Amino acid sequence: MLALPLVAALIAEPPASEQQGTAATTQGAAPHDRDTLDGVRARGELVWGGDIQGGEPYVFEDPADHHPIGFEVDIADALAQHLGVRARFHQADWSSLVPALERGDFDVALNGLEDTPARRDRILLSVPYFVFGETLVVRRGSKARSLEELRGERIGTLNQSYAYDTLRSRGLAPALYEGVSEPYTDLELGRVGGVLLDHVIAARYGCTRPDLECIPGDVASGTYVVGIRRGDARLKAAIDDGLSATRRSGRLRDILEKWKLWDSRQESSSHVTTVASPPSSPRSWTLADTRLFLEGASITIAISIAAFLLALPMGLALALARLDRRGTLRWLATAYVEIFRGTPLLLQLYVLYFALSPLVRLGAMSAAVLGLALNYAAYEAEVHRGALLSVPHGQAEAARSLGLGRWQTIRHVLLPQSLRIALPAMTNDFVALLKDSSLVSVITVVELTKRMTIAAVDLRGWLLPGLACAALYFTMSYPLARLAERLERRLRHDQRPEPV
């Protein structure tokens, strides 16, 4: 009953931005309800959203004191100064900048936000402050000199980026990454045929690698803009005026030269046409979306089953090792279990796929299966150990009195009984693994959850893709619970659904 008042309080609680005094409107709010520009001036700060993971030179942590620095930090400071306030950075995942802006987490989005028709349909966009070109990077010595020559191979890029739109518009196969360094690492290892990203990223993270080569010339061009919520026309006008004033005064050029970004592209402030972007009109859910979601679900199931089939025997071996009389074997098994249970699965996937790539070059699917298996083996070890310890000690004594050896006792007496005890927990772990498989998207596997995020961008909304994703996960996990219940009854030779 205590949960009900807590839920009610959370529902009634205003967003974090309002708790901090951020007078931010949500999409579709009437201007007279609350004006963001007045709120910015009233509290004396402009809150801007960005992602530190984007790295240098956009926004990143100063090694000396870990405060945000970068050319967009300087631009945000210039805009805030123009408005007569100070700037405050708000960390947000880059792929979620637009939804976070719409829900009022910050006043404006300013972090390599590209001007595309899809974004113009959702939010207001400022005048441009930077012109970029898309740079193709290939392995040194590759015969490919253009995107067309890479047809049939995967090309690394970032999701929801202009480069991603460019690849899709040309019918090429993108490999999606969360960070800007990882695609170039995979290119060095031969996991992708090329990488297409903004020239700012390519110059710092790709062209500097001795095994990679940047193809001269821009594949396409676009502009960076500031994102503002719909309904905040006054704030947009103020941001546009601030950017124009910063350009006229020469401060924008000074900022770009400071970060070694000024080039011939920046001479013209005119808008660069985003010819590679898909049509701007929102589309509805189609049969093709259903098919893609089902394909994503099939990948999720395949990864989960393969990983769990590996985790089960590994977990059983670890459990037996933890119960072994020899101290060294028991210590090693305990160390494995504690390390893999005590560190995040996401970190383990990064280490397995990226950090260990100079030693072991696994494909994305192989790394996904192995990473999940190694992690869940630690949990299965504890399940099996607990089940073995719960078997009455007299069972082992009876087996020894019949002349059975240690391993014969374990195999023929203890394991058959412990597996019955462990079955419910094993089923729960498989359902948990099924959901945790969504994390493998960070190593470019497009499973069900990643398919949902891609569809959400295309459909300009998260509700329908989210419901479809949830329905598929429920469809996959619910029968498992019922199957486990049936197996439990059969294993104990009792067909009654309820205990007596």
Image (cartoon, rainbow, N blue to C red):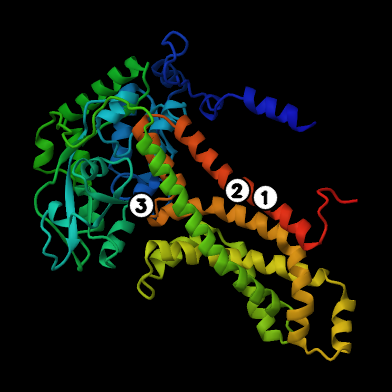
What element does badge 3 sit on? loop
Residue for badge 1: 481
Whether residue 93 is visible, yes or no, is no
Q: Are marks 1 and 3 in contact (CB under 8 Å)?
A: no
Eyeballing the image, is 73 above or below 279?
below
**Image: 217 above or below 374:** above
How far apart are labels 2 and 1 at the CA level? 7 Å
Query: What's the amino acid at mark 1?
Result: Ala
User: Which disc number belongs to residue 233?
Assistant: none
Report helix, strand or loop for mark 1.
Answer: helix
Quadrant (top left, top right, bottom left, bottom right) of the N terminus: top right
Q: What is the spatial separation of the Cα atoms under label 3 and label 2, in whole angstroms? A: 31 Å
Question: Mark 2 touching mark 1, by CB under 8 A?
Answer: yes
Check disc 3: other Cα within 10 Å, few if <14, some if 14-19, many if 20+.
some
Which element is circle 2 on?
helix
Compared with 332, 203 (above or below) is: above
- Looking at this view, is 73 or 345 the one in front? 345
Seen at 76% across and 80% down, the residue is 412
Spatial separation of the CA atoms under disc 1 and disc 3: 37 Å
Could you tell me residue 195's position as x and y percent? 23, 55
* Kind of residue indicated by mark 2: Ser
- Note whether 478 is above or below 336 in the view shown: above
Callout 1: few (<14), some (14-19), or many (20+) C-alpha neighbours within 10 Å? some
Number of other residues with Cα within 10 Å of mark 2, as a class: few under 14, some 14 to 19, many 20 or more: some
* Residue at the spot of label 2: 477
| Residue lying at 24% horizontally and 32% vertically, measured from the top left | 115
Q: Earlier in the sequence, mark 1 or mark 3?
A: 3
Q: Which residue is mark 3?
A: 179
Q: Position of residue 247 (x, y in %)?
A: 18, 29
